[in-house]
Amino acid sequence: MASQMMEALMALCEEKHIDQMYLIGRLETSLAESYANVMHLDYGARVTIDPQTGKVYVYKLIPKGEPDPETGEYAEFDEEDVTPKDTSRIAAQHAKAEINAIVRNAAREQIYEEFSDRIGDIITGTVLQSTPDFTIIKIREGVEAELPHFDLRRYPDERNERPQGERYLHNQRLKAIIIDVRDPNGSEAPVRGERSRPSIVVSRTHPDLIKRLFELEVPEVYDDVVEVRSIARDPGVRSKVAVSSRDDRLDPVGACVGPKGSRVRTVVSELRGERVDVVLWSDDPAKCIAAALSPAKVSRVIVDPDPDSTYATVIVPDDQLSLAIGKEGQNARLAARLTGYHIDIKNESLAAKVLDQLPVREEPEEPEAEEGAHRCEYVGPTGIQCRNMARPGSRFCGIHEKLADLGDVPVSDDPDSLI
């Protein structure tokens, strides 16, 4: 019977890709606790399993020396063989639940080691089953993922990663993005029903899902020639994607849309009809905001000059106001998420009224000339009056005052000629 048990363990290890010595070590630890309880051993027991024959040996621990004065525990033990005759039967009875737990935990640890570094990657799987709270997706043989869609009003600590209106059928193929991998040995609080739920958590609502889909469909995005700068998403309804190009000769929007919209249409198909707007990113906030409000036409964007401010006012034609705001404010809301600005949209009529009500800034008047000041009265032979101001108490400037008494002596209009 012992050899049969070992053969079953080895087959299980091979099927679940678990290290045989690791499983035997865990089984020895769990059996030691079981035999200590069954045989009423005060200081516990040590169990060894022969990997070849599967025979179980039980050793009673007998303390030696003096206990620790602080903890009262012994550091060294002698061992006495107390292996009962029916060890194989007892081991089989007590090991069944432990083996299941060990296998399950070992498989979760291997999944965690493999997928913990793949958070953010896209996976393709097949729907195995759906419950009211989550859907199980098979990634490959022995590896499953969970797509949660809990009612957050009843379970506020859970997740809802299913877009609005999506429903999944058995054997349906899905693409999703990995957002979490639960650590079986982690210190965080376990989630509800964790033992019956897969370790990998995937999402269909995360904005990075759109980026990964564009990487699959657009070679320029995969090669990082076209960069996805920002994504704003209303899952299941509409999304906006801002892109820029590292190559000035390449149109990033055209590359993502593809010939006759073929590339973006594939992404929309995978997202079950969710509308995707691809707009051009600009480092100029005004241009970026105007593009983000597409398809509405923008007349003017006024950005707060304060570099720490994120407020902008957008003026649109009267007939574009509804389009700029969108249904229930969706277009404006997505544009604000895409750009990171608080956007205030006004039509041209309202903006004109606001500007008319603003106080007009009066230009400062020029200071009046001092009382008695006047221009030099000298008039040259050509009839042109001197442009200098007269000296106080005199009719002439400083240049012509000295020559006023010369009578008929000709005076040049060029001041340089008097030097």
Image (tube, rainbow, N blue to C red):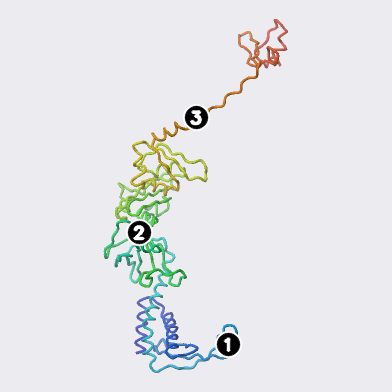
Q: Residue 121, image x and y in percent?
A: 40, 61
Residue under label 1: 67
Which quarter of the picture shows residue 185? bottom left
Query: Which badge, 1 or 3, is on the more N-terminal residue?
Result: 1
- Three-letter amino acid code at disc 3? Val
Q: Residue 114, image x and y in percent?
A: 42, 68
- Three-letter amino acid code at disc 2? Arg
User: Dot 1 surroundings within 10 Å: few (below 14), some, or many (20 or more)?
Assistant: few
- Three-letter amino acid code at disc 1? Pro
- In the image, what residue occupies the spot 72% across and 7% down? 406
The CA span between labels 3 and 2 is: 54 Å
Rendered-image quadrant of the N terminus: bottom left
Q: Secondary structure at mark 3?
A: loop
Circles 1 and 2, Cβ within 8 Å, touching? The answer is no
Query: Which badge, 1 or 2, is on the more N-terminal residue?
Result: 1
Residue under label 2: 204
The CA span between labels 1 and 3 is: 93 Å
- In the image, what residue occupies the spot 46% across and 69% down? 188
Query: Which badge, 3 or 2, is on the more N-terminal residue?
Result: 2
Q: Secondary structure at mark 1?
A: loop
Q: Is residue 128 left or right of residue 283?
A: left
Report the mark closest to the observer, 1 or 3.
3
Circles 1 and 3, Cβ within 8 Å, touching? The answer is no
Report the mark closest to the observer, 1 or 2.
1
Q: Residue 12, image x and y in percent?
A: 35, 79
Which quarter of the picture shows residue 154? bottom left
Q: Secondary structure at mark 2?
A: loop
Q: Residue 375, image x and y in percent?
A: 64, 14
Above or below for 89 versus 368: below
Q: Which mark is residue 360?
A: 3
